[in-house]
Structures are given as C-alpha cells and as structure tokens.
Image (spheres, grey):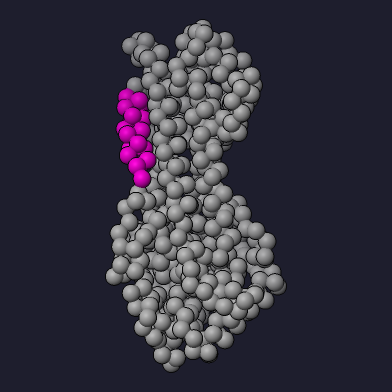
Amino acid sequence: MPVLSRAVITIAEVVEVARGRAPVSFARPVELDLAASRAVVEKIAASGVAVYGLNTELGAGRDITVGANALEAFQQRVVRNSSGGVGEPLSEEQARAVIYARLVGFTRGGAGVTPALAAQYRELLNRGVYPFIPRTGSVGSADLTHLAAIAAVAAGSGRAIVEGSVVPGQAALEAAGLAPHVLQAHEGLAALSSNAFSVGVGALVVTDARATIRAADAAVALALTALASHSGGGSASPFSEVIQAAHPSPGQAASAARVRGLLGTVSAASVQDPISFRSAPQITGAAIEAVERAASLVALELNSRTENPLVDIETATMTSGGNFQVLGLALSFEALRLALAHVAGASERRLAKLSSLSADARRSGTARVPGLSWYSSSVLVAELNHLANPVTLGGSSLSDDVEDHSSHAALALQLLERSVALTRTVLAIEALTAAELVLLADAAPASALQTVVDAVRTGLDAGLPVDELVTTLEAALLAVG
C-alpha cells in the first residue's frame, strides 16, 4: 500500500496506484503538513492582503478584488470556468494517475488545501471513482482543464464514469459512499495549479517507452539470427565489449549488452552488415538516454511544489511564481518522440533486408507472413516521423496577453503516447518477419527468443490474420524485454 509521506515519490509508485489500483494512505507527518499549509492560507485570507487567486480574480482579472464574503463562491466559479476540456475521456488508469499526481502535490505543502480536500482525492482513488476527464484542453501552463474535471467531481458536480456509463459526479460520489467537498477559499485554484496530467500520465508513458525500447533489443537480436540463418550476414561484432569500450555511452553499452545476452551464437556470412543492424546499439542507446532524461524530469515535477501562488510553511507566505511552466519536461517528451522515430526507422530498414531474404519463400508459396506487412511498417514510420515534429513552439497568447507563453507539455505527451504505441507495432512487424525466416531455415534461436518464435509458429498454424499476429508479437517482445 503506497503511504504518502515526506519521502520522494517514484514513477513506479504512480504506476502501482494507476494500474494496480493500490490503496493510498497518509503518514502522520503529511497530515501535519497539510494542516500547517492550510493554516498559512487562512491566516493570509483573514489579513486581507491581496494574493493572486485567493482574493483576486485570475489571468487578466488579477487586479480585481474578490470580497471576503465571496471567496468560496469564487473558487467554485474558478473550477466551473476551467472545465473547458473537450474530446474523449482519459482511461481509468490515466485518470487515477492524474488524481494521484495531484494528491502527491497536495502533500508537498505548496497548495494550501484543507486536509478534507486531500482526503477526498485520496478516497476518489481508494473507492474507485473515475472522473470523466476530457483529453484535450491543456496548453501546458498547468493542466487546468484536466484538473478542473477532477475538482468538479470531488465537489459534487462534473461527470464521472460508472460501469461504462457517464453519470453526474454527485451520483458517482454517492455510489462510492462519499459526500461532496465544499471548496474553501483558495482551494479551487490550488486544485488546478499543477501539471498533474503531464506528470501522472507521463509516468505511465515513460514506463511504456522504457519497455518498448528494451523490446527493440529483442527485435534486433532476432533479426540478426534470421539474417545469419539465411547466409545474409548477422555479425555480432558491432555489439562486442571492445566496440562499446571504445565509445563509452551508457545507453549504447546497455543496448549492446542486452543484444549480446539475447543473441546466443551466430555465424555471419558477411564481414559487415548494413548500418541499421551494425549501429543498432547507437540508435537504441540514444533512445535509452532520451527516455531516462524524460523519466528524471517526470520524477522532478512529481516531487516539486509547482503551485501558483506557492504556499510556504516555513516562511508562512503565499508567493506568486512560475514553477507551473514545465518547458524542460515538454522538451524531453519532444526529444523522446524523435528518438523513437529513429528506432522505428532503423527497424523498418532491417525489415526491408529481411523481406528481400524471404522473397524466394513467397515465390515458392512456403512463406505465410504477408509480404505487404512491410508496407504497414513503412506507413507507421511515416506517421512517427510526422509525430517527431515539435509542438512546444505552437503556443499562442491567452487571457488578454497575460498568459503569453505556453509549453504545450500535455500535447507533447499525447503525441509521445502515440509514438510509443506505433514504435511497438513496427518492432513487432520486424520480429514477425524475422521469426518466420528462422522457422523456414529450421534455425535454433537463443532460448530467450524462442518464446517469440514459438508465438509466431502457433499463430501461423492457427491461421491468425497479420494484425492479430502483430499484437501477439508486441506482447511477446515486451515479455522478453
């Protein structure tokens, strides 16, 4: 059971809560921090000192005062006005990741929400309340629309999904045995002042990207085995420790070591393979380093206090700032999409070489994998190349030119999510063709790759269509990885 304390929260914990539905609890120090943080807000609210979003309006209305008797109504209006997201809802596991990421933020002490609101978010997770969170709306300067959808449900409005049906948020709370939370002064803005979508869903996508990049090593090892089995090459020398020591890149070394471990013994007929084979560790290694960079920034944002205004317990202040601007995180998502496009592009090039080896089998009628699977791979790579284009520069000026820069981190992440899925499919198509060549040659792959080859044999014998074979191979490659 994840226990929120003052300790660092990991990406793995986000995944555990989102996908494993692990219940969440608070350690005593967190309860004390929540109360202390809230006390700062209440003291400043009572003083009448002007603080952005506490007793002033937002954005272009930042210098308009909100009366002391209207603070709660104003917070409700903040949530209602920010509920402008559109599109399909996030999946349940994505919604859980976002709620958990925001809850972690509450416990860091920078939000100043009441302990009751933090407890409400905890119970949304523990009792399985699934808010309807529209996918589109964040420009990456805090994920306002995503977080407004959660805050609305916590307060008894908005929409939720129960057993596949969209229901009013209050009905979902009642079904879970929860009462609506009445938003107090500052709580509406505090609930929204975070990039919890980019952080929470980012944790899930980075985890999937890590697995996909590891699967690339399995696809390379199987392709080399297939190449060697048909006297087309398959040299293991580019993966040797001698070559890696000459260029000490951590990602490259990790990729080469995994391919060596998966490859077993191959006998190459050619002294040198094409670059897509020969430089696979360099290509995959760059992606490894890109995903670890993204992971480090997701973890940084997860454990930071990014609220505006920031509540600081030690100084008993609320200070306007810009920690919600996550350009570094957004750029890491951009870089990882570009790295994945290279991984997939190299895979498609290896597939081209493998397809030429299987041409004779297709002409004789012994091949069972459709030759035009290569075409599908080519189309996917074209889309991946398009997805690799930057989106973080596409911001516009909002709120009467007050909010005049945006990171578009959420969009960069959503495109990355798509890139990870496409890359996984491209690798599976490569593995499918490679496995068939191994079967046609009656070759014996290394034991770690035998499960992939066996999955292809079983699928072919069962007459599965190529799309089902590819789905099977995606799972098999991830299992090897």
Q: Viewer-proximal residue, 356 or 73?
A: 73
Quarter residue 262 falls in: top right
Residue 305: x %, y % from top left: 56, 65
Q: Is residue 281 left or right of residue 165?
A: right
**Residue 381, magenta (yes or no):** yes
Percent across and percent down for residue 11 are 58, 52
Q: What predominant SS class does the magenta segment belong to?
A: helix
- Is residue 21 visible from the viewing direction of this image? no
Residue 458: % across, % down: 49, 27
Which residue is depicted at the point 64% across and 19% down?
A: 242
Question: Which part of the image, by quadrant, shows the C terminus?
Answer: top right
Q: In the figure, residue 33 lies in which quadrant? A: bottom right
Rendered residue at 57%/86% (across/down): 43
Residue 416 visible in image: yes
Is residue 335 toward the left or the right of residue 21 in the image? Answer: left
* Residue drawn at 36 percent across, 60 percent down: 405
> Which is more toward the observer, 216 or 162?
216
The outermost residue toward the bottom is: 69
Viewer-side residue, 314 vs 420: 314
* Residue appearing at x 33%, y 11% in the figure: 363
Magenta stretch, residue numbers: 372-390
Q: How many marks?
A: 0
Q: Is residue 100 above or below residue 184?
A: above
| Quadrant (top left, top right, bottom left, bottom right) of the N terminus | bottom right
Q: Is residue 46 above or below residue 334?
A: below
Q: Position of residue 191 (x, y in %)?
A: 48, 72
Question: Within the magenta stretch, is there residue 108?
Answer: no
In the shown orientation, is residue 439 left or right of residue 264? left
Residue furthest right in the image: 28
